[in-house]
Amino acid sequence: MSSDFRSIAHVWPSVPTTEGAGVHLRRAFGFDEVPQFDPFLMLDDFRGDRPSQFLAGFPWHPHRGIETITYMLEGEVDHGDSMGNEGVIGPGDVQWMTAGSGVVHQEMPRGNAQGRMGGFQLWANLPRSHKMMDPRYQGLTAAEIPTATLPSGVQAKVVAGTFNGVSGPVKDIMIDPEYLDVAVPPGTSFEHPITAVHTVFAYVYDGSASFGGREVASEHVVLFAKEGGGVAVTTQAEPVRFLLVSGRPLNEPVAWGGPIVMNTQEELRVAFEEYQNGTFLKVK
């Protein structure tokens, strides 16, 4: 691979906050960082071992204009929506939900036998041309998500995109994303090419490593610079696990109101008015 690696634009610590009905989580990035992460809007790390801080969950709420990507590490999330879909997102599973024209759903987390629950939710923006598309789901079990292993011991679960010739099962997403869960052993290097125009970030959730020559600890997000053909990560005495995500920027205006993201304030006004008067759902 070329040595034309991307440098680091910014590193942030994730910030404790609460969402839903009082779920304690850490926000890696969100509203304040738009448009630096375009086409991505938000990443939440909702791992926890105190059921009182997550069992209230995320009761019924609407989405329009975005995709929500939930990836579980442990515990489960019971999911239900306005179209009658129901299911459980379990350890290692991924739910890639395209809200499109509108979905009302709920996500209710449950801990495992040890009371632990955790995973990540990423929000990706939809382009203007697809904001009102029909809602859809791509739900993948852990067994359906392949893992690529290098001779060095580096492993990557491939949700979307391709790593070392292994392609992920999530397909036909407008922003051409790559979504990897990467594990790098101690004293090892990881290199991966990135499409030239794509935004790319990493979220370190266990251990630490050098990203583009800068040491980054757990619960920090790394935004890579725009220039460069790939990313490089090197570990020293301890291993690291991180999400590596990239996608094609939309370069469109963002009008964001809570769970709804459109292009204009007028579109937001219409969405919330429809939600109040019962005409929000276009597909039932």
Image (cartoon, grey):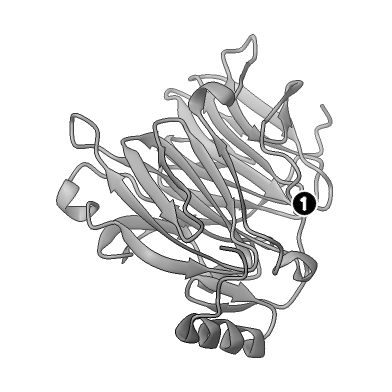
Left or right of residue 155: residue 216: left
Q: Is residue 258 above or below residue 177?
A: below
Q: Can you identify the residue that label 1 sits on?
A: 198
Residue sitting at x 81%, y 43%: 195
Disc count in the image?
Answer: 1
Q: Which of these two is toward me, 29 or 262?
A: 262
Residue sitting at x 56%, y 50%: 222
Left or right of residue 93: residue 101: right
Q: Amino acid at mark 1?
A: His
**Percent x, y for residue 74?**
34, 33
Q: Quadrant of residue 60?
A: bottom left
Residue sitting at x 43%, y 22%: 237
Element class at badge 1:
loop
- Quadrant where the N terminus is found in the figure: top right
**Percent x, y for residue 250?**
77, 64
Q: Is residue 190 above or below residue 20?
A: above
